[in-house]
């Protein structure tokens, strides 16, 4: 189970960091072509969610890999659940039901990480 949790953590960390890079580096116009919801929010909110995505991505792996405050890993997973859940709500409000499924997959994987790292498979 520990190996499976590390696999989930690594894959989700890579995904969160990739999304964070897109949100932070790309211009609003270029980002709107990938994420339609960007048009509904101010630039500060988009960049802020990018920063939070980056923190979740780093928090899923870095504390455990370095041995510095590994208790932060499940808390990063909880933060990711909140971000992905919020994303699902935004997609539902915009009637983008196809994207909600992706958010829900992220939520389930993050909940598994939080469950495992808070519980029996804590560091």
Image (cartoon, grey):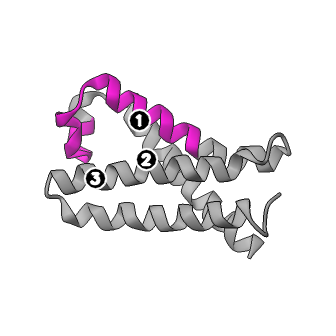
Q: Which residue is found at the position 33% from the left and 23% from the top? A: 44
Side of 77 where 103 appears, left or right: left
- The residue carrying mark 3 is 89
Q: Quadrant of residue 3?
A: bottom right
Residue 114 % position (x, y)? 63, 60
Element type at mark 3: helix
Q: Earlier in the sequence, mark 3 or mark 1?
A: 1
Mark nearest the camera among 1 and 2 is 2
In the foreground, 93 or 28: 93
Q: Which residue is mark 2?
A: 83
- Residue in the image at 27% along x and 37% along y: 31
Q: Label 2 near label 1: C-beta < 8 Å?
A: yes
C-alpha distance separating marks 2 and 3: 10 Å
For mark 1, does the 10 Å Cα neighbourhood hold few (<14), some (14 to 19), or many (20 or more) residues? some
Left or right of 3? Residue 95 is left
Quadrant (top left, top right, bottom left, bottom right) of the C terminus: bottom right
Residue at the far left in the pictured view: 95
Q: For the residues labelled 3 and 1, say whether their Cβ atoms are less than 8 Å apart.
A: no
Mark 2 lies on a secondary structure that is helix
Q: Is residue 53 magenta?
A: yes
Q: Is residue 35 above or below residue 50?
A: below
Q: Give the percent coordinates (x, y) of residue 122.
A: 79, 61
The alpha-carbon separation of the residues under discs 1 and 2 comes to: 8 Å
Q: Which mark is residue 94?
A: none
Say the numbered circle drawn on residue 49: 1
Of the residues under marks 1 and 2, which one precedes in the sequence?
1
| Residue in view at x 21 percent, y 43 percent | 37
Query: Which residue is painted at 53% across and 38% down in the image?
Result: 54
Q: Position of residue 103 (x, y in %)?
A: 37, 60
Q: Which residues are magenta?
A: 31-56
Which residue is the extreme one toward the right? 67
């Amino acid at each position: 189970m520990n190996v499976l949790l590390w696999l989930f953590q690594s894959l989700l960390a890579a995904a969160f960091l990739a999304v964070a890079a897109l949100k932070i580096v790309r211009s609003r116009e270029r980002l709107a072509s990938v994420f339609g919801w960007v048009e509904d929010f101010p630039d500060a909110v988009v960049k802020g969610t990018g920063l939070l995505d980056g923190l979740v991505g780093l928090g899923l792996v870095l504390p455990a890999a370095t041995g510095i405050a590994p208790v932060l890993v499940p808390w990063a997973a909880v933060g990711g659940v909140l971000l992905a859940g919020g994303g699902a709500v935004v997609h539902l409000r915009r009637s983008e039901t196809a994207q909600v499924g992706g958010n829900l997959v992220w939520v389930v994987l993050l909940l598994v990480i939080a469950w495992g790292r808070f519980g029996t498979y804590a560091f």
